[in-house]
Amino acid sequence: MKIALMDSGLGLLAAAAAMRRLRPDAGLVLSSDPGSMPWGPRTPEDVVGRALTVARAAAAHRPDALIVACNTASVHALPALRAALEPGLPVIGTVPAIKPAAAGGGPVAIWATPATTGSPYQRDLIVTFAASVDVTEVPCPGLADAVEHADEEGIARAVAAAAARTPREVKTVVLGCTHYELVGERIREALRHPGLPEVTLHGSAGAVAAQALRRLGATATPGTTAAIAEEPGELTVLLGGQRASLPDAALTYAEGRLLAEATRVHQ
């Protein structure tokens, strides 16, 4: 079995690592175009065009499913991707984990890119799944870009600024950009307040990986770290459509190191 994942940049690492844990034997194709980041400020038409290019580069490697591991691409390009690639290649989009976050009760904060914050798409998800709880939308300018470049000072500044805009009483935070999942612990630490419970973070990586397996009728066979290292599926990395190694920035994150250490890289 081979699973492809696409994103503008490193945001796909979280879902790829989740898939590696669920199915250590699955081959992975990681297709991105970091030179075109960020996609959030681009027009919907531009996002569609770039997403199709990145997706077709992945599809050329004949995967069994394609995960759109990007909220922006899922918002703007999912219909076009499905029209172009299905039914031959199942396409699984990413949806911010607003529904499970709201199910635990409020108040809830949604950290997202400035382009997504306040968008009709996000507002519709809030109305549909979180109408009964108090929701604060928190824009996080610069955070995805800082994560992409492993800019520690930029990450610290962006996380601190977003934390300052998050009400102290918030119990749950939705990570509305896949890049943010790579710095989840730093976000959790920034939201820690003396005398208050630890904030629960909701990302989408695990859910989208599990959904891809369901679409394929496949069973998860999670293994220990040792088992993952012993029998890893092959990894193909595509940057702008060209074979490459995992970028150095990817190796600064636990998800990137898991993929690098427990994978036979095909170049």
Image: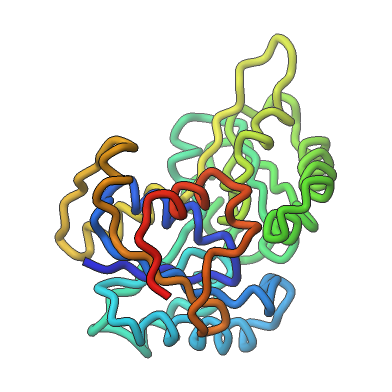
- Nearest the viewer among 19 and 115 is 19
Residue 71, image x, y percentages: 55, 64
Residue that appears at 77% across and 53% down: 151
Say whether residue 41 is left or right of residue 57.
right
- Nearest the viewer among 258 and 209 is 258
Indicate the quadrant containing the N terminus: top left, top right, bottom left or bottom right.
bottom left
Q: Quadrant of residue 76?
A: bottom right
Say whether residue 71 is left or right of residue 23.
right
Say whether residue 247 is left or right of residue 156.
left
Query: How has the structure been colored for display?
Result: rainbow
Residue 224, image x, y percentages: 29, 35
Indicate the quadrant containing the C terminus: top left, top right, bottom left or bottom right.
bottom left
Where 156 falls versus 217 (above or below)? above
Residue that appears at 24% across and 51% down: 231
The total number of labels drawn is 0
- Nearest the viewer among 123 and 111 is 111
Residue that appears at 81% across and 38% down: 160
Say whether residue 112 is left or right of residue 254.
right
Residue that appears at 58% across and 85% down: 50
Q: Quadrant of residue 199?
A: top right
Residue 63, image x, y percentages: 29, 76
Residue 61, image x, y percentages: 33, 82
